[in-house]
Amino acid sequence: MPKIIENKIIEEFKNKEKFSRDELFTFFIHYEPNLKESTFGWRIYDLKKKNIIKTIGRGMYVISYKPKYKPIISESLLKIARKTEERLDGINYCIWDTEWLNEFTQHQISNPLIIIEIERDFIDSLYYYLNDHLRMDFFLNPDDKDIQFYITESNAPVVIKRLITRAPTVKQKDKKVSYSIATLEKIMVDLFADDKLFHSYQGSEMGRIYENIINNYNINFTRLFSYAKRRKKEQEIKHFMDTMIPNLLNNIIDD
């Protein structure tokens, strides 16, 4: 099946709660007027195999395809990534920006926070290097006072902290700079675990963030809960998700 047809199917039905076999057949007839029923059956089989549609009842389907998450990378984040690579090439670290969350929140945050996490032994070295070379407000392992009185008042805050072992990250490349960013699974767990640092996203706002992420992107729940377990938050996050967004999590969370 041509890729262009698959894309048109996604675009046609992605906003529908469900659609029928007859509706899908009508769609195909527009592009293949002589389509036979037997051939149409193979079209459906192919779409399900490629995880573009899934069956939710007899002759009823939903779009199951979700795009790969690609956040918008700010110039500030790129500057930090360049300097980090320049200073500590080959060291495990990850960087992300709370501005990415504006895609999922009801209330837009005006002063985003950049978080960079790196192996424990290199935290101090990175902090002093970035502080010497970039005009931003860097905070090393901020405590409650730093968060309340300084970070919230800063126009360009950057938090530097320890990277948890085996944290889920992914490689990104922009303008010849290769660096690691946090996956959505990591961001979801960190928002929950670091409730003081991310105080603006707690409660119902976090429930909305989780719901919008799960609705719009493929989430690896095994990866999410594995990381949550390393942060000693697995059961709390499962309870939170089961309470806030139960309809989205059928057959995902095992008690």
Image: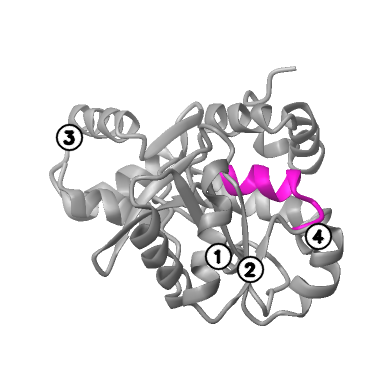
Q: Give the Cα distance between marks 3 and 1.
A: 68 Å
Q: In the rendered image of this protein, does residue 232 appear above or below residue 161?
A: above
Res. 113 mark: 2
Q: Position of residue 242 (x, y in %)?
A: 77, 34
Marks 2 and 1 sit apart, C-alpha to C-alpha, by 19 Å
Secondary structure under tag 2 reads loop
Q: Earlier in the sequence, mark 3 or mark 2?
A: 3
Q: Is residue 178 above or below residue 158?
A: above
Q: Is residue 73 among what the camera can see?
A: no
Distance Cα–Cα, label 1 vs label 4: 27 Å
* Distance in Å between CA atoms under marks 3 and 2: 56 Å
How far across and down, in percent of the image, does residue 173 sit? 30, 59
Q: Is residue 224 visible?
A: yes
Span colored in magenta:
186-197
Q: Nearer the viewer, mark 1 or mark 4?
A: 1
**Nearest to N terminus: mark 2 or mark 1:** 2
Q: CA distance from mark 2 to mark 4?
A: 12 Å
Q: Tell me if label 1 and label 4 are in contact, CB under 8 Å.
A: no
Q: Which residue is denoted by mark 1 in the rendering?
A: 128
Which residue is identified by label 3?
36
Give me the residue at 71% from left, 37% from top: 247
The label on residue 199 is 4
Percent x, y of residue 167:
53, 37
82 relative position to 228: left or right:
left
Look at 75% across and 50% down and name the residue there: 207
Occupied quadrant, residue 47: top left
What colour scheme was applied to this rendering of the protein?
A: one colour
Image quadrant where one finds the N terminus: top left
- Quarter of image, res 87: bottom left
